[in-house]
Image (cartoon, grey):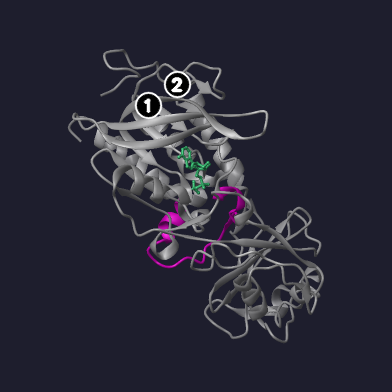
Amino acid sequence: MNGREHGREPPPVQSGGQVWAHVGQPFTPAHYDLLIVGAGRMGAALARFLRELAPQLSLLLAEEGGLPNEEGATLLAAGVWHAHVPGGQQQRAEDTRTLLGDLLNVCGLLEFSAEAGAGFSPIAECWTPELLGMVDPEVLPFVRRDGRAGTYSAGTLALNCANAAIQAGADLMLNVRAELCGTTSEGRARVRLHRLSVTNMHEVVIDHSVNVTAGRVIVAAGAAGPHLAEVGLGVVTPHRRAYRQTPRLEVPSTPASRVLQLNIGSGELLLRPRDGGYTVIAPVPHPDPWGYVPTGGRLVGVPVGLRRETLNAVLEVMDGLPALATEALVPGRSIADIPGAWVALPEGGWPLWERLDEAHWLLLGGERADLTGLSVARELAEALAKAETPGA
Ligand code: ADP
């Protein structure tokens, strides 16, 4: 079913969509061809690609926050693209790099190792004064360069994609919590949109709710997605939640500083240059540490307000990166500080999409969305556009 409402002409292609930002704006549409739940980086990117590939389909992007990706896990993503990805994901990573375009600030990446390996050379070959005091060349004498790697803001990416989608005719509804309510007898997805407002007591409340149906609903609600699907549709997914804490290293950096990477037993530890210092991105630990409360204090200069798993990751590489053992390391933000912004971990940690039933799809970014998220969102847009094309 095409068109904004049953029986009506579809909207003119490429005319800007409507935006509902607050409850005072009446919302009248009752039907869409496509409804995307969540305007994080994955949902916003999907909306953008769908407007390119299937502009004849009416589309609503529904976001619980006040701006695309205001609250999502994307906000705290590492925002680092690099080429060292396993086989099977390389093409997606390359496609994502192309799709990132100007947003990628190419600054290169140095990967350190205690042992020589494929592509590694002696550290002297790329030694810069900046590394002095950060890396101990005696402990980490080998380095592999990735000159095409770079950093970007995942939040900016989400915002850009959402803007592009709206300009190309997608509708956007903010401050709305979507609830999945199964399917109609004609196989259309039923969604209840709870419009949120804030009371004088700073309490978020449901002001009123509206019902819409959609030919297809794509759940791109980040870590909340699997739960939404489970509650609303009764389908069980294997995806889990995890936690990330990103301490900050107060060692001077410039936008041209390189990303530093160390492969440790539990994954990769990245030092991303950011805002004049470095963000320390330790691997995402398992499982959900619900109830964990970090406490203050210092241990050989290192803040023990770090979660134990984060601290373990730091300890693993402290010999090689002595700066981590100083007071330059501060706890920094943790995703647990932002309700709902937990990192969804699909199996293997890679972004994915999957069909939940005839009218619902799940799109998940997670921690590796930096590397392949855009290409996965594009794949789903292609699949949905194809499914909607008569005779395809
Ligand atoms: P991803 O990286 O997979 O895009 P994010 O966590 O960055 O994941 O984005 C998910 C977005 O979905 C967030 O902006 C969040 O506010 C939004 N969201 C979560 N649950 C709902 C819901 N029930 N209705 C609308 N939006 C939701």
Residue at the outermost top position: 8
Proximity of marks 2 and 1: CB atoms separated by less than 8 Å: yes
Q: In which image quadrant can residue 33 be found?
A: top left
For label 2, the SS is: loop
Magenta stretch holds residue 77:
yes
> Residue placed at 35% from the left, 25% from the top?
212
Query: Residue 86 location, x and y as percent?
Result: 43, 68
Q: Is residue 117 above or below residue 388?
A: below
Q: Which residue is mark 1?
A: 55
- Crowd around label 1: few <14 · some 14–19 · many ≥20 (10 Å): many
Q: Is residue 159 visible?
A: yes
Q: Which mark is residue 14?
A: 2
Q: Which mark is residue 103?
A: none
Q: Is residue 102 visible?
A: no
Q: Amino acid at mark 1?
A: Pro
For label 1, the SS is: loop
Q: CA distance from mark 2 to mark 1?
A: 8 Å
- Crowd around label 2: few <14 · some 14–19 · many ≥20 (10 Å): some
> Residue placed at 45% from the left, 48% from the top?
224
* Range of magenta residues: 73-95
Query: Residue 280 location, x and y as percent?
Result: 67, 64
Q: Quadrant of the C terminus?
A: top left
In terms of sequence position, does the residue under pointer 2 or pointer 1 come before the other? 2
Taking 32 as reference, is 273 left or right? right
Q: Amino acid at mark 2?
A: Gln
